[in-house]
Amino acid sequence: MKQKYYLLSVAAALCSLVNSCTMQGLDPGDVSPQLRDVAPPATVQPLALPAAGQNKVAYYVFDVTPAGQGILPMTTFTDNANVVVVFEGTLWELADTVHYNSGWMQNAYYHSKRQILADIQTLRSRGIKVLMNVDDAPSWSTSTPFTTYNGTAYNYQQFAAFINTCVNTVGFDGISLDVEHGATDNTNYRNLIGELGDYFGPLSSDPTNKMYIGAFYSGGAPGPIFREVALSQYLNYVMDMGYFQNNTTRFNYWANTLGNAKVMLGMSYDDNTQASAITEAQRHPTPDKAGIMVFAANKNKTYTDAIFAALTPTTPTAGSDITNYGGTITSQYTDWPSGEDISKLIDNSSSTKYLTQHAAAWVRFQSNTSNVVNKYTITSANDVPARDPRNWTLQGSNNGTSWTTINTQTNQTFASRFLTKTYTFSNSTAYTYYRLNVSAVQSGSIMQFAEWELYRN
């Protein structure tokens, strides 16, 4: 990142790259980090990605000097983030404390890796995505971007596999690149960026669970190359860390080539006033931006939480999907397979789905506010057309008990997978609860669909 944190992150990166760091010589094709005095990662259900436009990214910086508060742990430094990036130290340090230990992951609260690993899983159990910061380095522009303590060199494929193994060992949800550490743009660098995309991000083998994001700024080479779709396609989104620059200028610098939905601005307590950061959080272009980021978010909790709170309007705007503005999704049955639970209906990803072992069942969304809805969508899932809904009613309620039918559909079909169908109807009553009551599927005894959106009038 920028300013005083720059030298610290470079030092941490170099420590893990030079031969003075200790790691057992490993076969890069069979990387298995070793643990000492650490608890194994808890089993946590894979987490859905934050809703489009609602990524609230908070960096936890171990050596930050708090402003107006004491040092807080990862579990309490913010109440509003849905993505936390662990910053300083190295990924391999957490995954293998026998051989890697840079010493950066310490402060008045954290004295052992066991504490850090436990708090990472505590955050994940709350539904928060936790990523590890990964600094680039000059070595990334060579044919062997990583070297172990005994001189074993990893090519870009071996290094990417090693990073993935470390992520899985710790129990992270992905990685966040920090690009500004002296690498240059060449084929070696681009190969590594793309190879990491095989394991993390939207083009990976696990796009709904493994995140791949990055922080860049116009003056930090080779960051500007990520304005190219050819590179940014591997990332969920890019974050601008030119905190000291004009917000409009730095947003457009990326969005002009990548589109709004791929970009968010970073904010820093030292460089951005709370008022200006809130103004940016409240700005919702069309299409919407990816969200907002706060670097060294543990410096001042009040500052951080106010920015994240401002990202989500308290009342859905006209024409918006109310499921993106907070609320609770429930279902008649809870017999879904692992990874196909009811939350997948409103995660804004057609690649995930909700499934129940019943041919008839209802799903219900309770909004934080009452809204007049006059349009909704249903998206078919990835396979087995027989499981598509066929007959249903949409109902509204203000107490969750008494229901009014406001739309009825029969003999509906979905001509293809991942197909979104839109239904409009007349309605002038605001409801807090909306229920989709499916009475039949195409055939068989299983129902599934990928997305359900409810649009405010």
Image (cartoon, rainbow, N blue to C red):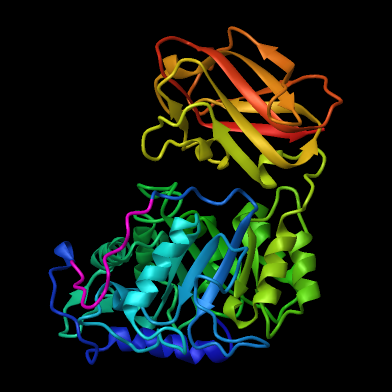
Is residue 353 visible in this depiction of the protein? Answer: yes
Q: Which residues are magenta?
A: 32-44
Q: Magenta span has 40?
A: yes
Q: Magenta span has 451?
A: no
Task: Give me the residue at 69% from left, 27% from top.
Answer: 376
User: Which residue is outermost to the right?
Assistant: 428
Locate residue 62, reporting x and y percent. Answer: 48, 83
Locate residue 98, reporting x and y percent. Answer: 20, 81
Q: Image height check: is 110 above or below 368?
A: below
User: Which residue is outermost to the top?
Assistant: 411
Which residue occupies the foreground of this view, 446 or 203? 446
Residue 352 vs residue 320: left or right? left
Q: Image height check: is 383 above or below 159?
A: above
Q: Dominant secondary structure of the magenta stretch?
A: loop
> From the image, which quarter does the N terminus lie in?
bottom right
Which residue occupies the foreground of this view, 308 or 421? 308
Give residue 93's quadrant in the image.
bottom left
Task: Give me the residue at 40% from left, 29% from top.
Answer: 335
Residue 65 vs residue 120: left or right? right
Residue 415 vs residue 364: left or right? left
Locate residue 377, reporting x and y percent. Answer: 65, 27
